[in-house]
Image (spheres, coloured by chain):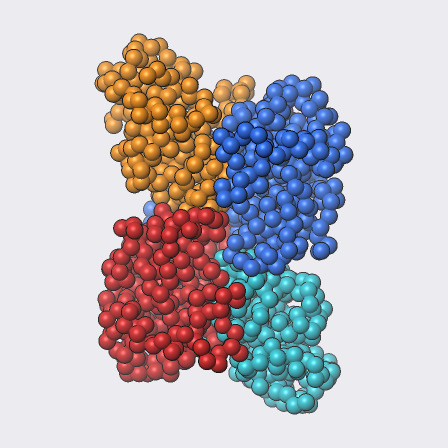
Chain colours: A cyan, B orange, C red, D blue
Amino acid sequence: MEYSQLEAAVIFAARELSKHDGKNLIAGIGLPVLVTKLAKELYAPNIKINIESGSFDVLIPEIPVSLFGPRISYRCSAQLSNLHSLAGTGRGDYEIGFIGGAQVDKYGNVNSTVIGNYLGKHKRIAGSGGAVDIGCFTNTIIIVAHHPKKLVEFVDYITTPGWKVKKPFSDELVDREELGLPGGPMMIVTNLCIMKFDDKTKEAYVETIYPGVKEEEIVKMTGFDVDVSRAKVGEEVTKEELETLRKIDILNIYRTR
Amino acid sequence: MEYSQLEAAVIFAARELSKHDGKNLIAGIGLPVLVTKLAKELYAPNIKINIESGSFDVLIPEIPVSLFGPRISYRCSAQLSNLHSLAGTGRGDYEIGFIGGAQVDKYGNVNSTVIGNYLGKHKRIAGSGGAVDIGCFTNTIIIVAHHPKKLVEFVDYITTPGWKVKKPFSDELVDREELGLPGGPMMIVTNLCIMKFDDKTKEAYVETIYPGVKEEEIVKMTGFDVDVSRAKVGEEVTKEELETLRKIDILNIYRTR
Amino acid sequence: MSEKVVTLEEAIREVKNGDIVAFGGVLDSRFPMAAIYEIMRQQKKNLITLAILSLHDPAVGAGCIRGFIGCYNYLGAFGKAPCIERECNKGNLIIEDLGHNDSLLIFMAAAFGLNFVASNYTKGSDILNPKYSKIEKIRELARNKEKIPKKKYILMKDPFTENGEERVLLPAIKPDVAILHVQQVGTEGTCRIFGVEGVDQFAALAADKVIVIAEEIVPEEYLREDPNRNLIPNIHVDKIVELPWGAHPTVVSHYYDLDMEFIMNYVKEAQTEDGFQRWAEEWVYSIENHHEYVKKLGIERLMKLRAVKGLGFRPRTWLKGW
Amino acid sequence: MSEKVVTLEEAIREVKNGDIVAFGGVLDSRFPMAAIYEIMRQQKKNLITLAILSLHDPAVGAGCIRGFIGCYNYLGAFGKAPCIERECNKGNLIIEDLGHNDSLLIFMAAAFGLNFVASNYTKGSDILNPKYSKIEKIRELARNKEKIPKKKYILMKDPFTENGEERVLLPAIKPDVAILHVQQVGTEGTCRIFGVEGVDQFAALAADKVIVIAEEIVPEEYLREDPNRNLIPNIHVDKIVELPWGAHPTVVSHYYDLDMEFIMNYVKEAQTEDGFQRWAEEWVYSIENHHEYVKKLGIERLMKLRAVKGLGFRPRTWLKGW
């Protein structure tokens, strides 16, 4: 079956969640919801999806456009305030946090606030939403379109702390651990590959390439010097995966195809 | 009709609330609930009674033994957490706070924590409950049995700040205003009289004596040198007041008679 | 019926220029749009808004809102908020970037009578970087300047622990007015919300004045049959307005769905200043009140948006006909 | 049925000596009495309890609880708590006196991931007076000493305001375990409470481990029909125990009333140490489990306590016969 690169991204990301069945996860707006729903259908039936909308253990009967609407709160365990759910990051409730981002660097720092110079010429983008909270305390999965302007050497603004972060009240870069932050980026999922982080350097390297994608393309489309030497080719997308995904987003609301 | 002194206290206190119809009040455990319910029946139908149990605008269909039971939460406006209601003191939501106390001094400071020396020989009593929170931010009415051991020169321990209070982290006495605390004691209601506070000295004086009570008795039963020169005799308790009170506490749960 | 019940026009007259306004709902959900339109009609100035929203975009375009302390500036799935972006670029809108928890904690702290809290939700990020803070500029806009803290954050050593870890102090902000759109309000002000609660309760407790706009006014006694189900007590509500469809085009759980077409059209029109002016003229200024707005939307459009009982939304595959 | 469902005995095995235990309910309402009895049977030691309670009195008498950080030590309308008073006088129970709001804020802060908050709820009182603080002694009892702050309060100038008013810093405390008694729990742990909510939700969010004892286990789907009505999400609940009448003799809204006679008898018996030992032997140690306790209470007694539907309690004038 034919499939788009973005469909591959969603499916490969969902496969990664199979290792976390039964755990608590918090998912941000957009593709994370689609990925986690697919994972719950196929690989991790007991994963608990929580949303910063105050909705715990959500079922997602239909892919939502709004992260704060009835398709999220529908028959969740409890519908409380946004703070009740998102403060679960600080409490240590969520093993995994799943976010998107406009700009991601090789240390897994994410920028969703401004592109350019915050104090000079820049373009405003979405803003943090819950991304900073999720990034400070959970093991994050970051999903982003593979493009040299999006996968960069260093982000213009750290919205979500990755492995090399700002020392509070300064521009000095320090290791995440130095600030006592738990968790950290686990992987970057793009429409071409999955990158993980080297234990020592904390830099992203290509771990899994989707079938049919060329290494050269990844190198060309990555805005930093990326290690592809450890890359393996992922298993082919199955008919079941694709059909399930298309059934979940039957109207292609998330434009994955 | 015959009535007890405690019934007089409840009725005279309820009359005082007639000036506050339509306002928000927070009432503590015990007699305050009985007084406010009587006031709502007779003098202040639109007074809003709130309880530190998280219960807003309560109806009190039957006099409760527990301040945290179903007779309090019954058809209140909203039943939230204790913090939701009691923090209304700090928010400035309640014009009046109504509390009891084991020991009250001439400045309207209330002690409900220990009788004696906290660091030496002492007897433990109830503890603050919400009394300190109510006393810091509202105009308080304090109800107490008239006895020289209960109405004292200065309390053994300030649980609820009155007019002369402790400077934070010290034993130094300062005026309440110096700490920026709003409100303050409005009156002390006993089974013999109502005391109010002199605007200048902030000391309690007898304002209203219940019919049949002798001045000498008040002087004798008061543990501090009390000014009775301004006292007037209150209006006789009516049949309607007494009947309503006895109907509210039909089983004499609060032992007012 | 209580004296609290007024018209939308009367309720919005309570909003003063330079007020700190907390809107209820979140983003494209249960957002008080009719209030946004009325704020535009009454030409409020220098308002400062808080928290996670963005469907206030038209009121930014109309020059009513000039300060924002919060965490989000997109129209969710509909992408960039055209007026927010434009007015921000022109220097007319000042944004102080926070995280989501901190945006909420500002209300929570005020709701519970606290002055500040030690929050750890931004460590390592540039949100905490003081060089990006614009709180002083926002302070200048405020009618009650003392309500806006002198600093966005302050760093201190934890005095309660052995090691004295660094803590981030985040100050409370008490809104002048909260404007909420809820599904049901009792005749005396008790509120019941269905679905996502957002920060409505904390905002209502924290604000000096609370305006509640509701899909329905219902008997107070009905809501009081189950007080545990209610989110905001009557004593906290100052003004009540009944406005069915008053959150259109945002989604109201158990009542109606997102009007995606309407929002997409807005986004398209508002790309240019002229386009936004035309849109505002058509959908706000030339419309006398909410009744006329609903009539202009038309029955056809509204019927398609109705939520299905037992679900709280209308499944997209059920959309054929109504 | 989820693996979370266990017996009371198994659940209470999760409580370790020296644990900081948050009990749900308040005072004589919805208090987890069966858990108190089982704590006595399992002879826990050096427990530290928080907040507003006092019906834990028998576990104080039995020597299980030795620290208390909270605001209330009476049995409500039933007067003094005999074992608390006695053990306190003997130096076996260490009480750190707080106000009610501060007792709650300790949980709230922990629930929302804060380290401390600036609270103003004790200014002017001796509660704030450091010479009366016993926090260091309570710290010695704790299994996880770092969980108890070094100081009860700290005073600082407000760094966010022009005048620098003095603020009182109050630290969060994260309980090791929360033990709640609720009316309904879903098969996966979702909790629904009727009537007074106490601090159960904050305690559940804050605690490392959460044990929920319920009048009834109900289908999870039933509670999920209205998630806005639920107070504690399933993901926060670790152990579930079904124990009808498990809060006896305290009151459980919509289920049963206060057993005043039982409490008055307890108060009378526990006036002396011997009397308390006799009471404990009769009502705790000689009773194998909660089933036996309920049988001993007898049907006659229980039927009189049943709440009336539509009211949530049984009017006292309806007590003739059952």
Q: Is residue A84 above or below residue C252?
A: above
**Residue C289 seen in render:** yes
Residue ID at (28%, 15%): B211
Q: Nearer the viewer, residue B151 or A246?
A: A246
Q: Nearer the viewer, residue B74 or A234?
A: B74
Q: Nearer the viewer, residue D97 or B38?
A: B38
Position of D138 with respect to A230 (left or right) is: left
Q: Position of residue D310 (x, y in %)?
A: 50, 44
Q: Nearer the viewer, residue C216 or B218?
A: C216
Figure label count: 0
Q: Position of residue A47 (x, y in %)?
A: 66, 65
Position of A85 with respect to C209 (left or right) is: right
Residue ID at (70%, 23%): D277
Residue ID at (36%, 47%): C235
Q: Position of residue D4 (x, y in %)?
A: 70, 52
Residue ID at (47%, 60%): C194
Q: Quadrant of the C terminus of chain B?
A: top left
Which residue is most to the front? D321
Q: Is residue B235 above or below residue C17?
A: above
Q: What is the quadrant of residue A248 in the picture? A: bottom right
Q: Quadrant of the N terminus of chain B?
A: top left
Q: What is the quadrant of residue B58 in the picture? A: top left
Q: Position of residue D239 (x, y in %)?
A: 69, 49
**Residue C146 seen in render:** no
Q: Is residue D211 above or below residue B8?
A: below
Q: Is residue A142 above or below residue D257?
A: below
Position of B152 with respect to C158 (left or right) is: left
